Image (tube, rainbow, N blue to C red):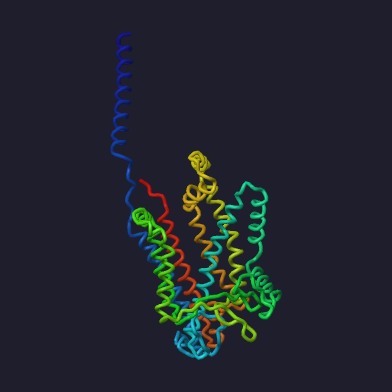
Amino acid sequence: MGAALFKTVNSASARQNQNVAMKSRTVSNSQRGPARPAAGPRWRPILYQALLLGAVGLLAWFLVANTLANLQARNISTGFGFLRDEAGFAIGESMLAFSPTDSYGRALLIGVLNTLRVAAIGIVAATLLGVLLGIARLSRNWLVSGAAGAYIEAMRNIPLLLHLFFWYALITETMPGPRQALNPLPGVHLSNRGLAVPWFEGGVPLLAWLAFLALAACIAYLCCSERGARWRGRRPLLAWAPALALLVLLLAAWFAGHGELHWQVPRLKGFNFQGGATLSPEFAALLIGLVLYTSAFVAEVVRSGIQAIGRGQRDAARALGLAPSQVLRLVVLPQALRVIVPPMTSQYLNLTKNSSLAVAIGYPDIVSIANTTLNQTGQAIEGVLIIMAAYLTVSLSISVLMNWYNRRIALVER
């Protein structure tokens, strides 16, 4: 009896000691941290990447060598030396002076500038219209919300090319001639030749205008920033900084033109208007189509960004006594920008690349001029490469600018 009891106690103490040892090993293992996996050969990922890079390089070499061999077999010259040759064709709409005796390079430069002009104006106009439509889509008024929703759904589901054809036909077929032009505003004439508006004329080159615009934008930005707000608190005169920047721009342009900057009002002479600035039917149709089409997508981006802000933010702003317009402008939109900016960048890129459809209605953008160039010279590969490089540069520039702005408004984690 005593021996059996002694054995039972010894076995119980042995099991307890075993459990204590297992717990101590578990604690020591947890203190040491997770077990490290066995270190494999580090050269293996590098080898795979090198093999992949080599395969891509061999494929590129094969394609280039095959293309050059086929071009040489057909006696087709290669290279970009044709850019210095005489173009021999006229461009109906250009921001720089151009004649058929100028080079192909200058013609392609004008095409790039024409593309940048319609893209820049289209981005600004589509943003303003899209923001208004996105806010209207969320209105409590059923009529306003329904009209905005119908516009968005209609514009998004009609192909952009049909937009361009419709507006071009509407301008050229239904508008009256220059002698019976419409006058919606004093000095403004709308006809089938385009829209003629008053503008400055003088001896100011395009690069000088761009430099003055950049200077005025920098002054306005510095004065409207947070540091500029502190300056305006000390010096109330700086509250007029944007207007002063515009005045500086006009004075600088006037002096650069040696005092030859004049305000010109378009007047009918012969069969068309002269003086001021004229928007051609092709440019107007392209701009209207791009703006109306892209603004529908921008409106949906704005709507989703506003709805991403919690209801508590609006309730707290109303509790502070802010008006609905102040709630939207001071509380909702600044926070919604963090959601809106990334997809808005894609819409800006789409508008810029969709401007290549201008060739369908005869607007001389980079695609149209490059097509004419490669048809005359036979340099098809070089022409396509120029088009690709132009759109790639513009798209990357827009992406860099929007990414910088996105980082600027992003929340900083502490």
Residue closest to the eye, 82 or 10: 82
Residue 34 seen by the camera: yes
User: Is 400 above or below relative to 226?
Assistant: below
Quarter of the image that includes the N terminus: top left
User: Is 84 above or below relative to 293?
Assistant: below
* Total marks in image: 0
Residue 96 image position (x, y, % from top left): 49, 81
Residue closest to the eye, 198 or 149: 198
User: Is 73 above or below relative to 391?
Assistant: below
Residue 16 image position (x, y, % from top left): 32, 22
In the image as oriented, which residue stretches furthest toward the top? Answer: 1
Residue closest to the eye, 389 or 224: 224
Would residue 330 be found to the left or right of residue 162 on screen? left
Residue closest to the eye, 401 or 96: 96
Would residue 238 be found to the left or right of residue 312 on screen? left
Residue 370 seen by the camera: no
User: Is 100 above or below relative to 207?
Assistant: below
In the image as oriented, which residue stretches furthest toward the right? Answer: 174
* Quadrant of residue 43 within the rendered picture: bottom left
Quarter of the image that includes the C terminus: top left
Residue 395 image position (x, y, % from top left): 48, 68
